[in-house]
Image (cartoon, rainbow, N blue to C red):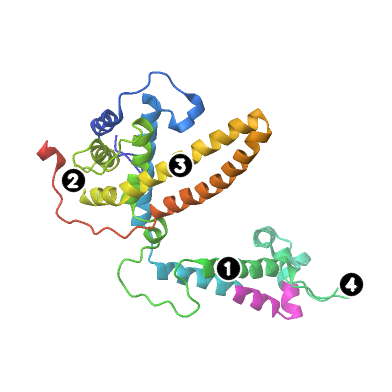
Amino acid sequence: MSKQGSDPKGDRDALERAMMEVGPFRTAHLPHLLQLCPCKRCVENLIVETAVKFNARERLIEGAPRKKTVIENLRRVSEAAGSLAEALVGLDNHSREYLGVLDELDQIGPIVNAYEAAAASMLPRPESEQEPASDGRFVETLLALEHYVSMRLRRFPGYEAEAVVDKGGNTNVAKQMLGPSAAYLVHGCWIVFENSRPGQATASENGAFVRFVNAVHEYATGDIEENSTLLNWIKRLAKPLRRHDQLLGKLGALEAELEDLEAQGAISHSSARMLELKTKIESAKHEVVDALLATLSLPKVKQNTAPTSRRSEA
């Protein structure tokens, strides 16, 4: 049976080779750890999930339009909503009545069905002896849509009020917003590997972590060719990811100590330490966030167009 969508395209063999790099496994399942349970079943599920999400990102990036196209589409919707609202508000009394009020001769199936489907009862109402003219809910919705799309457009990455100039090159909007898929895969693999083998992931070309990432990539894509982009991202991300993990461990230790003191109750000799810990925890949280951001804002990696086969080297 052919594999569709974001399903892993590789063989079971690639998944098993990835599993070997993070073993041996605990025999007992630890449900309180949720996805980070290091038992064999949970690790396998997490590898499969990482592969599926990687493929999903690849598909999204592959089919994404250029940034200029998205901006033009949003601008067209905003302008069309505003123009239609303006056209409806500008209707004369007779036009409003003809569109919004059905007389007895119009009470036939096709017209009534079309009237209801178009929500014509919410169109601008004509002036009558009983009430003044009103723009109606339809116009309010159109104006709200124009406002909303305009707000989203102004917040769109790279948007400027002036005309958007397409300078060529790679302006794939999904890739610019999500970042390179290879970097995402390295991030995901780091979490799986470090959860099973804490402190052991390195950027060594012959190391277990590099072999693990390659196996997961092969399982996700079915591609058996060596992907040098993955290795480049591993080398770029290993140090900042390790730094982030170390700071996270430091934060966890501080929080655990504070929880213990709070459980004992605030006695005189511990109150000063508790205040000190709270200050250190706030500082550590900022360090953790900064370290995480450092793993997400690295330079782009140049693609290598001359891959070699991993299997041919085995």
Identify which residue, 17 or 223, lies in the foreground.
17
Q: Residue furthest right?
A: 130
User: Disc 1 marks which amino acid?
Assistant: Met
Q: Specify the segment rendered in magenta.
A: 82-98
Crowd tier of the residue under label 3, counting other residues whose Cα lies within 10 Å: few below 14, some 14–19, many 20 or above: some
The residue located at (41%, 71%) in the rendering is: 68
User: Disc 2 marks which amino acid?
Assistant: Glu
Dot 4 lies on which element? loop
The CA distance from mark 3 to mark 2 is 33 Å
With 158 as the anchor, is 232 left or right in this view? left
Asked whether 88 falls inside the magenta stretch, the response is yes
Q: In the rendered image, is residue 161 in sight?
A: yes
Identify the residue position indicated by label 1 in the image.
Answer: 151
Q: Which of marks 2 and 4 is nearer the N terminus?
A: 4
Q: Earlier in the sequence, mark 3 or mark 1?
A: 1
Q: Which residue lies furthest to the front in this view?
A: 269
Identify the residue position indicated by label 2 in the image.
Answer: 226
Identify which residue, 273 or 61, lies in the foreground.
273
Asked whether 149 falls inside the magenta stretch, the response is no
Q: Earlier in the sequence, mark 3 or mark 2?
A: 2
User: Is 203 drawn above or below residue 253 in the view shown?
Assistant: below
Identify the residue position indicated by label 3 in the image.
Answer: 248
Question: Of helix, strand and loop, which mostly describes the magenta segment?
Answer: helix
User: Disc 3 marks which amino acid?
Assistant: Leu
The residue located at (53%, 70%) in the rendering is: 154
